[in-house]
Amino acid sequence: MKKRFIFDLDGTLLHGDYISERDYFRSVLNKEDAEKFLLLYFEKLCEYESLHQKYDYSSLSKFLSEKTGVNITSEIVEGWIKVNSKMDDKLLEETKSMLEYLKSKDKSLAVLTNWFKDEQESRLKNAGIFEFFDDVYTTWDDTQVLQGKIGEFVTIARRKGEEWFVGAITNNDAREQEISLDFLPQGKSYIAEIYTDGDKSVKTRTRVRCQRYLVNAQSVLRFSLRASGGAAIRLVLDTGDNRNVRNYRKQKL
């Protein structure tokens, strides 16, 4: 099996200047509506993602208008996306060298992101790293918000074909967290590639710990998430060729 490294975009590969985004809404909405919308929109975007497999201007406009009580037209959404695609992204110096190293080792790289595909690809191109990636995933066959609390933590699972991608993040507090895999189909086994924040014992440049386990719909993964950290999981259908992969036994990850 050729290893594939899958990266989140916002807050991982690129660190966006969201001041420009907030300034945009304050320029197209009156003061009261702008502050009301900015207070609610991130929460409502997460809710939108759990109900829709793909972003589009019309449904996003209607959804945000209904959920925030502010009239967000399709034109406002379109302007928002344009501002977002041109934001002043910060690329950590080590990021490009890491991607160059992985490609030199013939690794497959992909981006996992929630936003509009064209705009996210534009941001990757502006940052000079688009060429490193084989795929940019933005359209999903299934999306489920597994757990979350506003401002504290969230865990989201997305499916493309028979592969699942799970992302968990936490705020400034370290957290003990369990993630049930009961969204997987019954009677099938999966190989879970689990990526977590490592420590000095992890002898890699990125200090990311990678572990592989055999799991199924009855598995419940137990994480000790570091402050401002998270975990990423890729779930691939087991073909029976991975005899060296151990069953997951509820150990801390």
Image: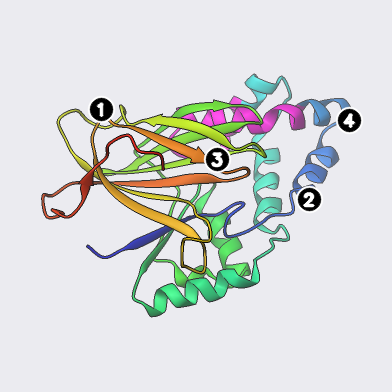
* Amino acid type indicated by mark 2: Ser
Question: Earlier along the polypeptide chain: callout 3 or callout 2?
Answer: 2
- Numbered badge on residue 20: 2
The Cα–Cα distance between marks 3 and 2, rounded to whole angstroms, is 24 Å
**Foreground residue, 47 or 220?**
220
* Disc 2 packing (10 Å; few <14; some 14–19; many ≥20): some
Q: Nearer the viewer, mark 3 or mark 4?
A: 3
Q: Which residue is mark 4?
A: 31
Quarter of the figure with residue 1: bottom left
Residue beneath the point at 19% across and 28% down:
186
Q: Earlier in the sequence, mark 3 or mark 1?
A: 3
Q: Secondary structure at mark 4?
A: helix
Q: Nearer the viewer, mark 1 or mark 2?
A: 1
Q: Position of residue 221 (x, y in %)?
A: 37, 35
Q: Residues within 10 Å of mark 4 (few under 14, many from 20)?
A: few
- State the image coordinates of residue 224 (x, y, percent, origin top left): 49, 39
Q: Which residues are magenta?
A: 37-63
**Distance of mark 3 from mark 4, alpha carbons?**
32 Å
Q: Which mark is residue 169?
A: 3
Give the residue displayed 75% in from the left and 46% down from the top: 21
Q: CA distance from mark 4 to mark 1?
A: 49 Å
